[in-house]
Image (cartoon, rainbow, N blue to C red):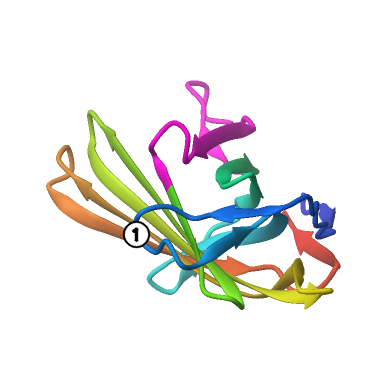
């Protein structure tokens, strides 16, 4: 049975101060921000049913990326479809996240190594400004690439953003 799911996406900015990005580009200041975007994964010509909410929060020169994944259905041992929500978190403080500001967008890179291989997620979130501070997402691009040691191949996924403040998705 297909059930519509409505996602409400609001972008909010928390502005306190600005601080340095770090040694890679000391002259560029990283603004305090909170940017959110919901995406689906596209592999080849197939778009998966899963929905992933990326939430990037930066303050005081430190950033955290939280990813909430929903509706990734898998077959259970009894042959039925099932999914469990998944939350992943990465941060500049933990050393598994890198964020740079271009002045009109933030570039985000998350690198992960596990028993299956090494993966890299790259995101670019363009943003609108109000009073010189990032306010909400205006553009998005992103991809995930994994060198799978178990499957002996490279897996690449493109992230396709859901459009608009309210989006109805057939599940």
Q: Quadrant of residue 132?
A: bottom right
Q: Quadrant of residue 26?
A: bottom left
- Start and end of the magenta stretch? 72-97
Name which residue lies at 64% across and 32% down. Answer: 85
From where the camera sits, is residue 82 visible?
no
Name which residue lies at 17% across and 37% down. Answer: 150
- Horizontal placement of 141 versus 131: left or right? left
Residue 19 drawn above or below residue 69 = below
Residue 132 drawn above or below residue 40 = below
Judge by depth and name the residue closer to the eye, 22 or 117. Answer: 22
Where residue 140 sits in the image (x, y, percent)?
59, 72
Judge by depth and name the residue closer to the eye, 159 or 151. Answer: 159
Asked if the stretch drawn in magenta spans residue 162, the answer is no
Dot 1 alpha-carbon crowd within 10 angstroms: few under 14, some 14 to 19, many 20 or more: few
- Horizontal placement of 70 versus 143: left or right? right
Residue occupied by mark 1: 24
Query: How many dots with numbers?
Result: 1
Circle 1 — which element? loop
From where the camera sits, is residue 149 visible?
yes
Where residue 124 sits in the image (x, y, percent)?
52, 69
- Horizontal placement of 72 versus 120: left or right? right
Seen from this angle, which residue lies furthest top?
77
Name which residue lies at 56% across and 63% down. Answer: 29
Asked if the stretch drawn in magenta spans residue 81, the answer is yes
Name which residue lies at 83% across and 64% down. Answer: 168
Q: Quadrant of residue 70?
A: top right
């Amino acid at each position: 049975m297909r059930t519509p799911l409505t996602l409400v996406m609001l972008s909010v900015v928390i502005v306190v101060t600005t601080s340095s990005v770090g040694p890679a580009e000391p002259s560029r200041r990283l603004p305090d921000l909170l940017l959110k975007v919901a995406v689906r994964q596209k592999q080849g010509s197939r778009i998966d049913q899963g929905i992933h909410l990326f939430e990037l929060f930066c303050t005081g020169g430190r950033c955290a990326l939280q990813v909430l994944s929903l509706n990734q259905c898998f077959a259970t041992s009894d042959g039925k479809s099932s999914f469990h929500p998944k939350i992943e978190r990465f941060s500049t403080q933990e050393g598994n996240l890198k964020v740079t500001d271009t002045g009109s967008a933030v570039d985000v890179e998350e690198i992960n190594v596990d028993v299956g291989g090494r993966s890299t997620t790259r995101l670019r979130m363009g943003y609108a400004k109000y009073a010189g501070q990032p306010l909400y997402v205006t553009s998005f691009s992103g991809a995930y690439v994994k060198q799978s040691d178990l499957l002996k191949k490279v897996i690449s996924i493109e992230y396709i953003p859901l459009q608009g403040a309210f989006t109805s998705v057939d599940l």
